[in-house]
Image (tube, rainbow, N blue to C red):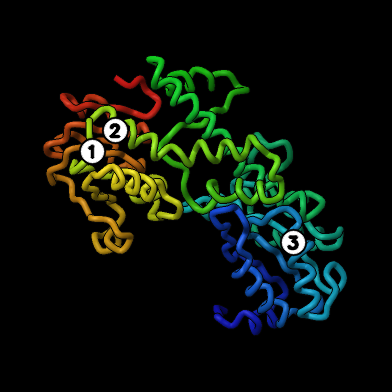
């Protein structure tokens, strides 16, 4: 049964799964507004014997120290006694949710042993899992022993990716000034089983990777590696625009198209996409900026404040921001008049841009 009345729905439920967005502001402080409102509605309908599972990524300690206390105050019930409470992070990717639910272990951590056991039993009943002989344990529901451990597991896996990408980007910037193709270096390094360097690129976007390291920093502000990585990745769009100016010349009044509004290829999602800082940097440089994305209509692009671009229209320069499959075979003929092309994802082919100043992030700047 679908309902917009949270309290009434909770009162009729044996299990409540919470997946409400949690954002952080520019200074990295979490905004619990929506989560607190949802928790209040849940508390008003909560009855004895109910399982509550928070799946929204949270700073460590939030389930126990914020939401357990709020639910107890509102409902008059005792967490871990009258109702069970766990944290079990969602671990799915946009565009492949059902496949990921089967592929990855479901992590569970309760505020006490009773809650943890209840959470494990619930998820074992509702989920099926693929065989994964590569894992240290059998694929399925994994009890991490506490809500804090489960919260940290989600922050750790996403923060690792941000730090890894930042390292790849640092290698890319070095390679650009030393006559090296960083992707060849990364491929060579990753041929050794203990190296897992990610791909460099113009931006790190989406709901997860740019946000969750800042949640971790809210818990652990002394984590200088994490903060340095976030700064390095955040600086990439401006670096790419500066590189374009170096290759193309003064960008004032230049017609520049940004290819890709999505934060990554194959999805129609612009959350924290690199398109926004890239367009801002180009505009600040005086360029006449337009945006193309095969997944968005002109009206949708206009709604973001962008001037829509159509392949075949005259342009002076282009920056590839999202690695959509449609761009893999892109040629200079689709961008009449183009003089400079900068691939921020390593998606396109050199031979398709003969006679054009062509650069891929992480290759020697010529």
Residue under the image location 68 percent in, 71 percent down: 16
The numbered disc on residue 235 is none
Nearer the camera: disc 2 or disc 3: 2
Q: Name the residue under label 1.
A: 251
Q: Is residue 221 left or right of residue 103?
A: right
- Label 3 neighbour load within 10 Å: few <14, some 14-19, many 20+: many
Circle nearer the N terminus (2, 1) = 2
Quadrant for the N terminus, please. bottom right
Contact between marks 2 and 3 (CB within 8 A): the answer is: no
Q: Position of residue 354 (x, y in %)?
A: 18, 24
Q: Where is residue 18 in the image (x, y as percent from the top left)?
A: 64, 67
Q: Is mark 1 on a helix, strand or loop?
A: loop
Q: Where is residue 118 in the image (x, y as percent from the top left)?
A: 79, 63
- Label 1 neighbour load within 10 Å: few <14, some 14-19, many 20+: many
Quadrant for the C terminus, please. top left
Circle nearer the N terminus (1, 3) = 3
- Label 2 neighbour load within 10 Å: few <14, some 14-19, many 20+: many
């Amino acid at each position: 049964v679908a309902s917009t009345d949270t309290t009434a729905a909770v009162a009729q439920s044996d299990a409540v799964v919470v997946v409400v967005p949690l954002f952080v502001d520019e200074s990295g402080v979490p905004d619990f507004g929506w989560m607190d409102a949802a928790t209040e509605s849940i508390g008003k309908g909560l009855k004895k014997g109910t399982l509550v599972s928070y799946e929204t990524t949270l700073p460590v300690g939030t389930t126990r120290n914020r939401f357990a206390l709020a639910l107890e105050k509102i409902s008059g019930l005792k967490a871990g006694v009258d109702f069970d409470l766990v944290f079990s992070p969602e671990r799915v990717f946009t565009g492949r949710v059902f496949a990921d639910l089967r592929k990855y272990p479901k992590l569970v951590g309760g505020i006490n042993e009773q809650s943890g056991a209840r959470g494990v039993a619930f998820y074992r009943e509702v989920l099926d899992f693929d065989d994964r002989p590569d894992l240290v344990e059998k694929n399925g529901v994994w009890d991490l022993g506490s809500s804090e451990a489960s919260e940290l597991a989600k922050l750790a896996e996403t923060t690792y990716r941000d730090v890894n990408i930042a390292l790849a980007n640092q290698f890319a910037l070095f390679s650009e000034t030393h006559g090296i193709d960083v992707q060849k270096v990364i491929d060579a390094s990753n041929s050794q089983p203990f190296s897992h360097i990610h791909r460099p690129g113009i931006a790190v976007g989406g709901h997860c990777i740019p946000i969750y390291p800042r949640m971790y920093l809210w818990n652990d502000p002394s984590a200088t590696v994490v903060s340095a990585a976030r700064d390095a990745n955040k600086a990439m769009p401006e670096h790419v625009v500066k590189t374009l100016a170096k290759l193309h010349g003064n960008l004032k009044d230049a017609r520049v198209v940004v290819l890709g509004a999505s934060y990554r290829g194959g999805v129609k999602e612009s959350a924290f996409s690199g398109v926004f800082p890239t367009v801002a940097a180009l505009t600040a440089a005086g360029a006449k900026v337009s945006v193309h994305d095969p997944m968005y209509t002109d009206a949708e692009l206009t709604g973001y404040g962008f001037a829509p671009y159509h392949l075949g229209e005259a342009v002076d320069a282009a920056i590839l921001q999202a690695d959509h499959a449609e761009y893999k075979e892109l040629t200079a003929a689709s961008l009449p008049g183009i003089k400079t092309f900068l691939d921020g994802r390593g998606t396109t082919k050199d031979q398709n841009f003969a006679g054009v100043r062509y650069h891929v992030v992480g290759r020697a700047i010529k």
